[in-house]
Image (spheres, rainbow, N blue to C red):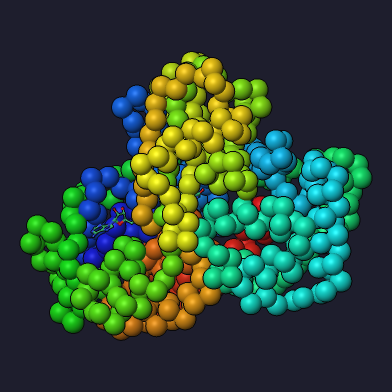
Amino acid sequence: MPRVLILGAGPTGLGAALRLAEAGESDFLVLEASSEAGGLAGSVVDAQGFTWDHGGHVQFSHYQVFDDFMERALGSDGWLLHDRESWVWMRERFVPYPFQYNLHRLPAEEKWQCVKGLLAAREAGVTKAAHFREWILATFGQGIADTFLFPYNFKVWAHPLEMMSAQWVGERVAVPDLTRVLEGICRERDEVSWGPNSRFRFPRHGGTGAIWRSLARALPSERLRFGATVASVDLPRRRVRLASGEELGYDVLVNSIALDGFTKLTGRADLAARAAQLLYSSTHIVGIGLEGQPPEALRTKCWMYFPEANCPFYRVTVFSNYSPNNVPRPATTWSLMAEVSQSAHKPVDHASVVDDVLAGLRATNLVRESDRIVSRFSEFLDHGYPTPSVARDAHLAELLPALEKDGVYSRGRFGAWKYEVSNQDHSFMQGWECATRILAGAGPEAEPTLHTPGVVNATYQARR
Ligand SMILES: Cc1cc2nc3c(=O)[nH]c(=O)nc-3n(C[C@H](O)[C@H](O)[C@H](O)COP(=O)(O)OP(=O)(O)OC[C@H]3O[C@@H](n4cnc5c(N)ncnc54)[C@H](O)[C@@H]3O)c2cc1C
């Protein structure tokens, strides 16, 4: 096997390393800048003893291999199972998600605008969309777009929706089932997504990061170096230089560092200029630890979406509901975690973001005036979401093959920049499949997650 260096010990890097280890290979090394594994899927404990993920992390899986590793990471006792209860807070009320099947909860005029828009979309019969905004309109119609999807998606993505492609949501425009929409309205019945097939699991202890810390320990200790920051990469000589000055050679490099930063490390101005055109948004994570117990309305909720302008966040997770061990004293403390997006199109005042989130939590009735706050946690993730921009695939079609010519496979959430395959399971499998390809000396067909995201994601529906 060629000598392999793996940059980053997040899900992608660990997926690659575990594949090589499983094949009995030992000529590989993982280099990780921080002191712990997990990357964006890691967890931290604050000074007050509250555990926080870097944003609300939920386990989905499209792969048996991934499921097997989750079991191996924490054992069958290490998980808590939850019904996926997600809601939208708007017009001073909770609407169950999916929004389009629960329109009966809206005021009468909005209900009508949503139905009218759906009927018009069906009538128009548009089958292709040039960008995400057009896709929303063609799929859901003007009413649902104006009421929920336009404001909500701008809050999440922090980019005008015309700048985003329609491809990542699936090629096809499919108008929602009108009978189901109308039945929900006429019967005034909630249609909820948390039936028996909509369960997810969460680590009993240690947050999401516990998974990746455990899997990192499954590697031989000499195959993984923490505190090893890559400072530059010499592509022609196939050598990596660490911040410490040490140099390491490789035959093949598996990179999970964000493509824009990585290409700068290579000193290749042409690649760096191209990668700089990939769009992304940043994410503020604000965790609020509280004394007491959640109000009745939040006792079983997992996360909530917020399309309105009365709060800065797009999503809040009742993080203490994921595991009682996410708080220092389960009987007397609970926690909320809010996410706020940022980009040049949607600036955020860093100095006031925690206070702004708190004001928003009060405006949306999640936190009451009488609640005693015992912890305020905040962090800024410069690279939070890889934006599926209209030009993204053209940039990737230049960048990834150019790097591969020099023996570099750039994979993972920001390594390959494909949002639709950037969750933990996808990232882990991008690393895994890349290592499989290296071991077999195979071609791109060995990496279905990277090259055919639509096919891989369709298997999720089939496996449910
Ligand atoms: C707000 C938010 C919510 C999310 N929600 C979910 C969810 O609900 N479910 C889900 O499955 N996934 C979720 N994810 C995605 C999940 O976090 C990613 O899938 C995963 O972390 C990506 O793994 P990765 O290995 O590709 O990259 P990362 O996790 O980014 O790992 C890259 C690693 O490279 C290291 N590194 C960087 N620079 C250097 C350097 N110069 N030298 C050496 N090492 C370096 C970093 O320290 C890091 O450990 C979410 C992500 C965010 C930000």
Q: Nearer the viewer, residue 51 or 129?
A: 129
Question: Ligand 1: which quarter?
Answer: bottom left
In the depicted structure, whether residue 213 falls above or below residue 21: above
Residue 441 seen in render? no
Res 161 → quadrant: bottom right
Res 351 → quadrant: top left
Res 27 → quadrant: bottom left
Q: Residue at x 71, y 57 (%)?
A: 146
Q: Position of residue 202 (x, y in %)?
A: 50, 38
Q: Residue at x 43, y 18 (%)?
A: 329
Residue 123 vs residue 29: left or right? right
In the depicted structure, whether residue 97 falls above or below residue 265: above
In the depicted structure, whether residue 41 falls above or below residue 20: above
Q: Position of residue 418 (x, y in %)?
A: 48, 67
Q: Nearer the viewer, residue 236 or 309?
A: 309
Q: Position of residue 257 (x, y in %)?
A: 31, 62
In the depicted structure, whether residue 277 falls above or below residue 464: below
Farthest residue, direction right? 186
Q: Residue at x 22, y 57 (%)?
A: 31
Q: Residue at x 19, y 61 (%)?
A: 230
Q: Nearer the viewer, residue 93 or 63?
A: 93
Q: Nearer the viewer, residue 211 or 111?
A: 111
Q: How many marks?
A: 0
Residue 132 vs residue 385: left or right? right
Q: Quadrant of the N terminus?
A: bottom left
Residue 122 seen in render? yes
Q: Position of residue 191 (x, y in %)?
A: 79, 44
